[in-house]
Image (cartoon, rainbow, N blue to C red):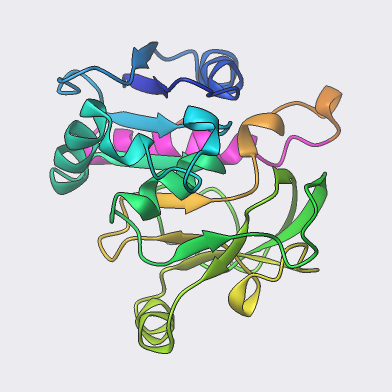
Amino acid sequence: MKFAVLVFPGSNCDIDCYKAVEDVLGEPVDYVWHTATDLSAYDCILVPGGFSYGDYLRCGAISRFAPVMNEVAKAAEQGKFILGICNGFQILTEAGLLPGALRRNMSMKFRCHDTVLQVANNNTPFTRDYAQGEEIVIPIAHGEGNYYCDEETLARLQANNQIVFTYKSNPNGSLTDIAGISNEQGNVLGMMPHPERAVDQLLGTDDGKRMFTSILNAWRDKHGAASVR
């Protein structure tokens, strides 16, 4: 399985994502610059956190127009796995690959600390190695993590089981405690917490490790290969 880690001007979690794949999975992984126009070689695309283009206009609003995002949209249509983390989640919503928007935290402050998440849907390629309802510890680091959508969109998210993670104690004012959502097909996930910063007990928690093993196991199942533990 081959991973791409996108890099925009201002990305700062690209190295964390790269090292998580390299250290946890030992699978091939490349940095891919935002001007790239071909992602056909990759099975999973990671859209990392940071401050792409300085978060000017709105978080992710400029990155949405980067050439590589056309290829991300094509990859999503093809059923490839797309994971957007923090700023990556914001970019995916701006690009229309996920519904809703991320607004300023209710406190109007940048929040950076561990959070307890509940796995609201473990029937996705990103969460299959977790138990349904399991509580996990994953750090956050954001100023605009307040998820919002209209009532109709929220009803669709709930009906389609697209709410994948929720906060046990809401740090930012997100609607119905939403921490991460998927698209209807389930192959695109956006989340504000950082699983790539939680892959080793040296970091305080390794609860993010199973996010990466889930992705690899889902891909191996799809291709008839043995799962990893």
Q: Position of residue 42 (x, y in %)?
A: 25, 22
Q: Please say whether residue 145 is one of the residues in the magenta stretch.
A: no
The furthest residue to the front: 57
Q: Tell me which residue sits at (63%, 53%) in the image.
A: 144
The picture quadrant where one finds residue 106 is bottom right
Q: Is residue 155 above or below residue 109?
A: below
Q: Nearer the viewer, residue 214 or 143?
A: 143
Q: Is residue 176 above or below residue 37?
A: below
Q: Is residue 108 left or right of residue 42?
A: right
Q: Position of residue 6 (x, y in %)?
A: 39, 23
Q: Nearer the viewer, residue 4 or 89?
A: 89
Residue stretch rendered in magenta on the structure: 205-224
Q: Position of residue 164 (x, y in %)?
A: 51, 63
In this rendering, does residue 229 appear at all?
Answer: no
In this rendering, does residue 66 appear at all?
Answer: yes
Q: Is residue 117 above or below residue 25?
A: below
Q: Is residue 141 above or below residue 122?
A: above
* Quarter of the rendering occupied by the N terminus: top left
Instruction: Tell me how many marks there are.
Output: 0
Q: Tell me which residue sits at (64%, 69%) in the image.
A: 133
* Quarter of the rendering occupied by the C terminus: top right
